[in-house]
Amino acid sequence: MVQQATPRETNERLAKRQAVSFGRLRKSIGRDAPLYLLALPGIAVLILFAYLPMSGLILVFKNYNFNDGIFGSPWAGFANFEFFFSSMEDAIRATRNTVMLNVLYMLTGTFFSVAIAIVLNEMRSKWFVKITQSVMFFPYFISWIIIGAILFSLLDYDKGILNQSLAALGLSQVDWYSSPWLFVVILVLANIWKSAGYGAIIYYAVLQGIDTSYYEAARIDGASRWQIIMRITLPMLIPSIILMSLLSIGGMLKGDLSMIMGVTFLNPLLLPTTDIIDVYVYRTAIRSGEFGFASAITLYQSVFGFILVLVANKMAGWYDKDSKLF
Amino acid sequence: MREVGSFMFGKKGWLGLLMTAVLLLGACSQGGGATTTGTGGSDANSTDASGNEASGELAQAKLKIVLYGDESNRMKQLAKTEFYNRIKQEINAEVEFQFLPWTEYAGGKTDLMLSTGEDFATYTDANYMVKSVAKGLYADLTPYTEASADLSQTVDEASFKAFQLGGKQYAIPVGNKPNSAEFYSVLVRQDLLEEVGMSEVTSLAQLEEYYDKAHAAHPELIGYAGVDARRMLLYDYTDKNLYWQNDFVALDESAQDDRIINWFESEEFKKYAGLMRGWYEKGIIPKYAATNVPQLQSDWNSGKAMFWAGTAARPFEGAATISQAVPDAKLVNYFLGEGRPKISRGTYSTAFFVSSAAKDPERYVMFFNLLQKDQELYDLFAYGIEGTDYTLDENDRITRLTTDSLIPDWLLMNKNFIRFDNSVPDDFIAEYKAWDDDAVISKGAGFNFDNTPVKNEETKLNGVLTEYLAPIGSGFVDYETGYPKALERLKAAGIDKYIVEYQKQFSAWHVEQNQ
Amino acid sequence: MPQAENKGLLIFFYVCIAVFSVICFAPFVLAVSGSLSTESRIAAEGYSFWPRGFSLETYQFLFGSKLEQIVRAYAVSLTVTVLGTVSAVLVTTAYAYVVSVKSFRFRNVFAFFAYFTMLFSGGTLPWYLLSTKYYHLDDKLIGLIVPYLLSVFLMFLMTNYFRSIPHEIVESAQIDGAGHLRIFIRIMLPLGRVGVVTISLFYALQYWNDFYLPLMLVTDERLYTIQYLMYTMMANIQFLASGNAAQVGGAIIAPPLETAKMAMTCLTVLPIAILYPFLQGFFVKGIVVGSVKG
């Protein structure tokens, strides 16, 4: 088996393999024709609005000017990336901040969304569930600018409600807006508040699809509420949790500029932890109108995220083949 | 093995797709401006006539003017009736006004419209102009400056210079308002000042005295509603008459040479930072200024601040806002020293450019000309129809009958045509009109720096500015503590290279100017 | 039967949810009261749970002169939302079904094809160029619908919901000779209706709240959506309040900045507050899987 194959044999084998794949393709098309039909509109949308525009990515490697157009503009190689990576210290800090915050958001967000979904699932009172679920969804629609303003009235050193309460209790006041690491807690809490309800809807819907006979059986066997949650409800959610996590891992290097802007107003004292990649690009490149630089860094974020997803997807496959994204 | 097969099929497919896409996009974008011909579906208006005056008769043209902000109902009406008819009558052009939200100014949708070859005109500032011309997005208007002959009567020559690059005119300035020494004066709440027994503020010491007294009487008020006072405090930290080209570079207007000053590495900056630190520690600048700059604006608007940075027009401009909160508010400009001439960058409000894909740039210039041609047209565009939208009394004071804005005041503002309402006292008007009398045009006015050789450095310098230098400059961080690190970062970002390049370009331009 | 333990835990759950709900609801109360207050008092004194200086001036300012435009904008938004949601749900569930069919050889290719677009984007310029110059979507109702017809995120969510449908049902249908189309329409959609309702909700919200498509593609004001209208108004108010605009010839009323922000929040959340409890009726607990047992 380990002999050297002659070129002719290799070619033949290749041709055969291609014939087989093509044959399989034709067969697949025959049997699965309706599937291709069903996917067609989606594919059209993706091609028109995602893939065709994606060709604009070459602009990242060019110095675009209007008269030469996309095709004729001169190549710039990696020049658009230079500003970011030549300040290694800033680049590393920005990347670290982005990843750190995103990991925290993901862990806490998932935990609370799942917890809320499970808890709501346990409740009997329909109207309670309806009302609270709607209410918990509201924060998702409040813009970060408003949230920032509200937080300010809570956290301001002199007039903030929190500090005034602390003073009333005789405790020392905290300068939130000067403490970058303390502020990470604020950001995480704000993120939970804003998105927990949204995620809970997704998980709650999954729970609605669970056959109640499972619960019945467990109850008959004498399982306590807690045991049921841990042994039945939660495991039912794991595939969804994996899916949601996989979907968000791709955005590991991307951040929410409007969140940081709205909540911290880009306060320089907080930058050591809040200077995520998007913020850094905003206050350096975009401030000078260098949009080409900004696009280059977006590509960096995408590529990195892509690699992470490939790895994570593979890992998900080890756990359960059906959990893979692709 | 099976998966490899399916992947290979997929990969080939995509590669082919992407290649086609690239080719497609490339082919169509070739020769940029020409792509608009024949694309009837797009919203660009194309002219079908050449628009030349060979026969003495102007051929019909279609123009699209983009403005920013909210289109009021009255503007909508007038745009279709009086404006439309009058413009047609004057220059035989059919004008369509399109409004975009302010967020799209100098970037955003405006940039997209330019980059995809739409035929339109709108206004811009010098910074955006430089960037756009570098990308070839603006039309060269030099051949058409005759078409703006009337406008040149009421708009200064220096304003035209400000929008020239390499000797070519890329935008036509509009507006003529006294704006020298912008932010160099202190805009004081005269009512508060008088309440604490003072009558004027002519020095820093007096300003701080005002703060102390007012603070004692009203502890809830803040002092300064801003974070940048480098112009106001000029007299107190330098003998030079500094005028800033941008955040990093300043000029000494009292010196005749062409030397630029590296602001952040100067002694002046150190002294200034010291003053601001004092203000911050004293509470003149509130503690939350580091975090919540919009709050400062809110504070001023609601009457909670003692003074602000002043401009020629601020005593009556925006008075509506503050008088809602404090009906007795009176605003007066004071300089904290004297003996230095007021510097102006040019009296224009803004400048209109034409997209390079425009069919008939000359007609656009003729339209701009109408905006500043004479009092009658000015009244029409700014205020509307006499009798319906406004009335004039015997002193030529205007009373507006509608709150709808048309073509905005601030855009057209020309001291030769502007009308005041009855809330503005005569002495304000006299002072306003005479504000620029002893002013001097900056020796750097009209210079536009081309940052291509130092794009990276400038970008990184922005980062150093926003993180390390701004807090020092506003007093949040003490100079001694924060400066060493800031300086180190400044050097690492390439400040030296940036300054050298800036000086080089400035000197070359300066020589040209003085020939 | 350990009833006591169950009850304690349950009470704990109720309390936690109630507390969290209050925290979620509180800012909304601030927004409502803020929108009904006078601007000068809010700017001076900050927000509060009770309107400061009750007045309808903010809503008057926002809606007063533009009533007709607003009514029309609501109509446009409604049309776009309804048409968009229905079409998007069809496109998405169809694609999601394809990806969920285990026996489909190329399902991972389709999945990857979709997912790749979540990560990589060519930027606004090429999208804008194509949409206006080539697809001619500018100033057309369909332009406000088509670009969002497939949200990859929601598509994957849908595959997840499809996955939870017991495979035996599908198999027995296949034995009966049903093809993919029939399985999709007769089995997957009905049994996956919880998922369908969920993604419908999210699509509806996306279409309703979007101002990006009108900003990019619409210049004809008859096609403005309500969100875009509010976005424009907000941007304008912010500009006016920043002191950059000189209003010389006549006192223009001071624009209500803070209260306008509040009013906009209310107007955004209001439709959800109305829509959501109504949709919840569709979240039926548990599925009767009678056919499998039979």
Image: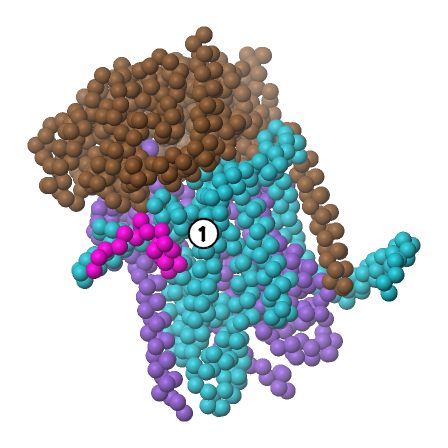
Residue B401 screen position, x and y as percent: 28, 33
The cyan one among the chains is A
Residue B319, quarter of the rendered image: top left
Helix, strand or loop: magenta stretch: helix
Quarter of the image for residue B228 reads top left
Chain in purple on the image: C
Q: Is residue A247 above or below residue C250?
A: below
- The local secondary structure at tag 1 comes to helix
The boundaries of the magenta stretch are A171-190
Residue C275, given in percent of the width and then of the height, sits at 43, 63
Q: In the shown orientation, is residue B487 left or right of residue B61?
A: left
Does residue A305 sit above or below B392 in this rendering? below
Give the residue at mark 1: A97
Residue, x 21% and y 34% (percent of image)?
B307
Q: Which image quarter is the C terminus of chain B in? A: top left
In the rendered image, the vertical position of residue C113 relative to residue A298, given as above or below = below
Name the residue furthest top: B515
Colour of chain B, in one word, is: brown
Seen at 77% across and 60% down, the residue is B5
